[in-house]
Image (cartoon, rainbow, N blue to C red):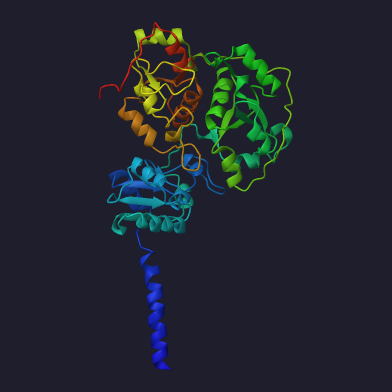
Amino acid sequence: MFQRYIKLLCTSLLLISPLTQASPTPQVLDNSATMQWLYQDKGVIIDVRDSNLYNGWPAPGELRGGHLPGAENLPLSWLKEDTDELAKRLASSNIKPGSPLLIYGSTPAQSREAVKLLHQQGFPIKQLHIYRDPFSVWAETPSLPLTHLANYQALVSAAWLHRELKKPAEQRPLIVEASYGKGLKYLLAHIPGAIHLNTDSVESGPEWNLLPPQKLAENMAKAGLSRDRTIVLYGQPVEAAARVLFALHYIGAKDVRLLNGGLKAWEAAGFATDIGAVEPNPVTSFGKITLKHQSYITLDELKKLQRDPGNMRLVSVRSWPEYLGEISGYSYIKGKGHIPGAIWGHSGTNKDNVVDFLNPDGTLRTDSFIHRAWSRAGLTPDKHLIFYCGTGWRASLTWFYANLIGYPEESVYDGGWLQWSRDKTNRIALGALPG
């Protein structure tokens, strides 16, 4: 009997051992040690909470939202997906094995789970540290530093929108699904109450510039949108929503926001969708048109700025092959290359995506990757950045992103590569800029 007991005990220890090895114990830092880490720049700080919390929205019951200064955002849900995309994200965020890491989450348990997953990715346990307390402990201490995106309120979460829709009808935001065409995907599933808006309502060919302001205002009024109502946009793809958002901003809408992650985030949060179409409730007038001239750059204005650029920087947010001139990117654009002097500002793999600006779950990437890339290229907040792409969609999203993270002066050259390349008198550059 005793020998059997010893055998069972040994077997149990063998079974427990791998679990113990798979659950490494990181170094634990209190508030004081965490402050030392911050100001002595001891390594990379990782926020493993939801990206909306990182951006600045406080969780229920928390006094402040945002993140520790300099923190990268790497939500726990992404760490659980052991994919090539995760490896790319780790590399682009300067999160590499051998680098000291300080990890914090909504709870210590969340932080410890992140440590386990990072350890499985090859990060030595001796390099891993966690913040001892729940994030709320840090947030409720006013003397402890937090930062957030300059205009995080413009990028809303599915949870925020769901709460807003419980308000009386006249206080709810107007929800718009923006996409090109008749909205077939919208008809199959959309956020309850959302209307579909064809992007033809804000732009037209052959150059796909924005419609004249008065026509924009008329189309928005037909869709039930006015300058004084809060409007939340999502799109398929997100660039479509950004295009409509930019148009609304240009004619003076006071409160236009983007749903972070779009319909995918709404469904992932467990919220219901509807099918069919919601008929717009037209309003008599959009309201007073107050043009944001500084946001919208015409071809003539761009050429004038090129002659005396000052602090202006022209930024191409087309794909790298488009920028180099290897491809035009579009079946209806013959010219290849970029506008002389334009700096590449990242984008995606082709005209149909903006993966450099998106997280694995489709939310907008708001950690320091783009800011670092732009800073290396001289695209700093003290410069007047003018974004352009092929026809305006990608540039509109990048304009929104720059505003979100606090670049105070940014514009869209609306004509983009299509307009520039159609005029044979305009010079075209090929290849990358020196340096």
**Front residue of this view, candidates 191 and 290:** 191
State whether residue 339 is above or below residue 190.
Answer: above
Q: Tell me: 40 left or right of 388.
A: left
Quick check: 57 above or below 314?
Answer: below
* Residue pictured at 67% horizontal, 42% vertical: 273
Residue 194 occupies which quadrant of the picture?
Answer: top right
- Quarter-wise, where is residue 2 in the image? bottom left
Please provide percent x and percent y for residue 207. 52, 14
Q: Which of these two is toward me, 276 or 21? A: 276
Front position in the image: 194 or 189: 189
The extreme left residue here reads 435
Q: Residue furthest top?
A: 425
- Please state the total of marks drawn on the protein image: 0
Q: Which residue ends up furthest to the bottom in the rendered image? A: 1
Image quarter of the C terminus: top left
Residue 385 screen position, x and y as percent: 40, 20
Viewer-proximal residue, 166 or 429? 429
Can residue 276 be seen here? The reply is yes
**Residue 313 in the image, given as x and y percentages of width and height:** 36, 18
**Residue 170 versus residue 219 in the image, above or below:** below
Left or right: 323, with 110 as reference point:
left
Q: Is residue 144 at least partly visible in the picture?
A: no
The quarter of the image holding the N terminus is bottom left
Q: Residue 142: horizontal and vertical position, in percent?
A: 45, 44
Q: Residue at x 30, y 29 (%)?
A: 376
